[in-house]
Amino acid sequence: MRNPLLIGFILNLVLSASGCAKLAEAPSVELKGKRYTVELADTPELRERGLMFRRDMPADAGMLFIHDNEEPLAYWMKNTYIPLDILYFDSKLRLISAQLGVPPCGDQPRCPTFASAGPAQYVLELNAGQAAALDLKPGDTLRLTGVKPVQ
């Protein structure tokens, strides 16, 4: 004879777990209604490597750099082979400045730096031309999904 109490307990456990379990969403950002899947660069090592050595990136993808503090930032394109838009956001996820159509530097011995116009905490790198296509302006906000904001 089956134990109805045990069966009820197991059924309740399974139903409870399935209702509470939520799949983690892949990290993405949204700008002016356009969603980009992003890789996160949230450690010093990942920020240093960035998009180096990549030869291409899907049009709906990017890399989100997350810094521990809001401060003036400067990026360079050493060992990068993709032209990029570099978008700087403050701690409230507002666009403070952008470097558009930054050419790759590849393996050249000297690469210029591209600085933010003010303190930034988040930097989004997208394929060159994406920011212009969205008609981004200072003050536009970045929405994060599946990304834990800095406290």
Image (cartoon, rainbow, N blue to C red):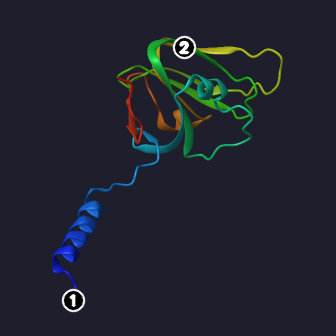
33 vs 73: above or below: below
Image quarter for residue 94?
top left
Nearer mark to the viewer, of 2 and 1: 1
Tell me what residue is drawn at x 75 percent, y 16 percent: 111
Could you say which quadrant of the image residue 15 lies in?
Answer: bottom left
As helix, strand or loop, the secondary structure at mark 2 comes to strand
Q: Please state, as top left, top right, bottom left or bottom right, where the C terminus lies in the image.
A: top left
Of residues 151 and 36, the one drawn nearer to the viewer in this rendering: 151
- Pointer 2 residue: 73
Q: Position of residue 103 (x, y in %)?
A: 71, 27
- The 10 Å Cα crowd at callout 1, few under 14, some 14 to 19, many 20 or more, is few
**Badge 2, how many Cα within 10 Å: few under 14, some, many 20+?**
some
For the residue marked with disc 2, what is the amino acid?
Answer: Leu
- Compared to residue 107, the image places residue 113 above or below, namely above
Find numbered disc 1 in the image and state the secondary structure of the residue it sits on: loop
Nearest to the observer: residue 98 or residue 1: 1
Seen at 72% across and 38% down, the residue is 54
**Tag count:** 2
Q: What residue is shown with label 1?
A: 1
Task: Tell me if residue 88 comes above or below residue 55 in the rendering.
Answer: above
Residue 32 image position (x, y, % from top left): 40, 38
Q: Position of residue 22 (x, y in %)?
A: 34, 54
For the residues labelled 2 and 1, the Cα–Cα distance comes to: 70 Å
Residue type pointed to by label 1: Met
